[in-house]
Image: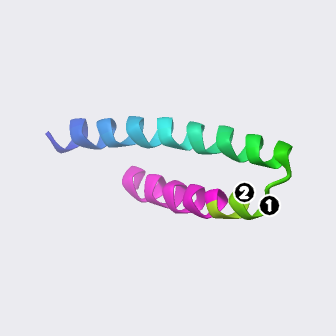
Amino acid sequence: MRKAQNKTIMKKNANEIFMLQYRIKRYQAMGNGAMCQALNGKLQKLLAKQANITM
């Protein structure tokens, strides 16, 4: 049960990571550095959370 739940969470997080990376690239292209920094902060937290789940 726990394994399946972790797999679902990881898949959701992977989708969120992909979306954040896309949004960061778009804001960089527009020259909006403040929004890039905010999104990068969210991305780093999500990546750390993803690493903790896999361990």
Which residue is found at the position 55% from the left and 43% from the top?
17
**Front-most of residues 17 and 33:** 33
Around disc 2, counting alpha carbons within 10 Å, would you say few (fewer than 14), some (14 to 19), or many (20 or more)?
Answer: some
Percent across and percent down for residue 55 are 40, 56
Around disc 1, counting alpha carbons within 10 Å, would you say few (fewer than 14), some (14 to 19), or many (20 or more)?
Answer: few
Which amino acid type is marked by label 2?
A: Cys
Position of residue 34 relative to residue 28, above or below, is below
**Dot 2 lies on which element?**
helix
Which residue is found at the position 75% from the left and 47% from the top?
27
Left or right for 35, reference 18? right
**Can you name the residue that lies furthest to the left here?**
1
Residue pointed to by mark 1: 33
Position of residue 15 relative to residue 36, above or below, is above
Mark carried by residue 44? none
Boundaries of the magenta span: 39-55
Which residue is found at the position 79% from the left and 55% from the top?
32
Q: Main secondary structure of the magenta part?
A: helix
Left or right for 28, reference 4? right
Percent across and percent down for residue 22 are 67, 37
Which amino acid type is marked by label 1?
A: Gly
Residue pointed to by mark 2: 36
Percent across and percent down for residue 53 are 37, 53
Tell me the quarter of the picture where residue 12 sits.
top left
**Dot 1 lies on which element?**
helix
Which residue is found at the position 70% from the left and 47% from the top?
24
Residues under labels 2 and 1: Cα distance? 5 Å
Percent across and percent down for residue 47 are 54, 54
The color scheme shown is rainbow
Q: Answer yes or no: do the residues labelled 2 and 1 have beta carbons within 8 Å? A: yes
